[in-house]
Image: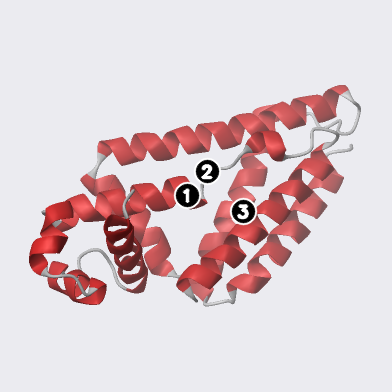
């Protein structure tokens, strides 16, 4: 991707994180890039096109996980590796965008859902990969005697995922600092994990 297009996408994602898709205007994005209208419109002809490519790039860059990097020695080690990786991604996010982890962060996804079935499919692939990675380590943990819960592997995977998703949304709604979000998720995961032994 060339530097000009990268500049446009980075500028757009910053603005879409500050305001909603509807609130940001093309003129505002053009002005913020410092490009002429002609140079800008060479790359993107509509706000919808720019928004979808921006969100798609953003999702691929920040939400995609390399699940093979996480420990397979135990469920406990797996979710601690997950925590470390997500904490690093949040730190990178703060460096890049400042305190932009707010309601507009989730608004990006809902607006993209409305505009593009392809985006919904892309996000579903990410979610399926996440659930499958959890189910795989949970199955191994069960075989190794690490967990003995009567819940299915899928149920356990869903609870781990839903805890993190729910805490993220709750922290935004309540205006709590995102720095403490991972501490809260870790505490809930640790306590849930302890319940899986009996």
Considering the image in quadrants, where does the C terminus appear? Answer: top right
Q: Residue at x 31, y 52 (%)?
A: 2
Q: In the figure, 106 relative to 171: above or below?
A: above
Q: Residue at x 82, y 43 (%)?
A: 77
**Label 1 Cα neighbours within 10 Å, binned few <14 / some 14-19 / many ≥20:** few
Q: What colour scheme has been applied to the protein in the rendered image?
A: secondary structure
Horizontally, residue 19 falls left or right of residue 152, namely left
Q: Which mark is residue 164?
A: 3
Between marks 3 and 1, how big is the CA–CA gap? 19 Å
Q: Residue at x 73, y 40 (%)?
A: 70
Q: Which mark is residue 61?
A: 1
Instruction: Look at mark 2 in the image and give the residue it sits on.
Output: 64
In-front residue for pair 51/8: 8
In x, y percent, where is residue 169? 51, 62
Look at discs 2 and 3 and give the one toward the viewer: 2
In x, y percent, where is residue 128? 52, 32
Between marks 1 and 2, how big is the CA–CA gap? 6 Å
Work out whether mark 2 precedes mark 3 in sequence or the reverse, and give the earlier one: 2
Tell me if label 1 and label 2 are in contact, CB under 8 Å.
yes
Give SS at disc 2: loop
């Amino acid at each position: 991707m060339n530097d000009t297009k990268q500049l446009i996408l980075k500028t757009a994602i910053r603005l879409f994180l500050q305001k909603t898709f509807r609130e940001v205007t093309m003129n505002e994005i053009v002005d913020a890039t410092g490009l002429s209208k002609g140079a800008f419109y060479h790359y993107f002809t509509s706000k919808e096109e720019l928004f979808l490519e921006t969100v798609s790039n953003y999702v691929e860059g920040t939400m995609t996980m390399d699940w093979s990097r996480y420990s397979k020695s135990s469920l406990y080690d797996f979710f601690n590796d997950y925590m470390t990786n997500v904490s690093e991604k949040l730190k990178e996010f703060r460096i890049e965008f400042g305190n932009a982890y707010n309601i507009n962060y989730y608004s990006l996804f809902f607006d993209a859902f409305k505009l593009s079935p392809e985006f919904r499919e892309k996000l579903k692939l990410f979610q399926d990969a996440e659930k499958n990675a959890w189910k795989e380590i949970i199955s191994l943990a069960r075989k190794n005697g690490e967990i003995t819960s009567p819940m299915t592997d899928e149920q356990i995977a869903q609870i781990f995922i839903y805890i993190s998703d729910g805490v993220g949304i709750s922290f935004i709604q309540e205006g709590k600092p995102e720095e403490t979000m991972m501490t809260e998720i870790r505490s809930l995961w640790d306590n849930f994990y302890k319940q899986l032994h009996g």
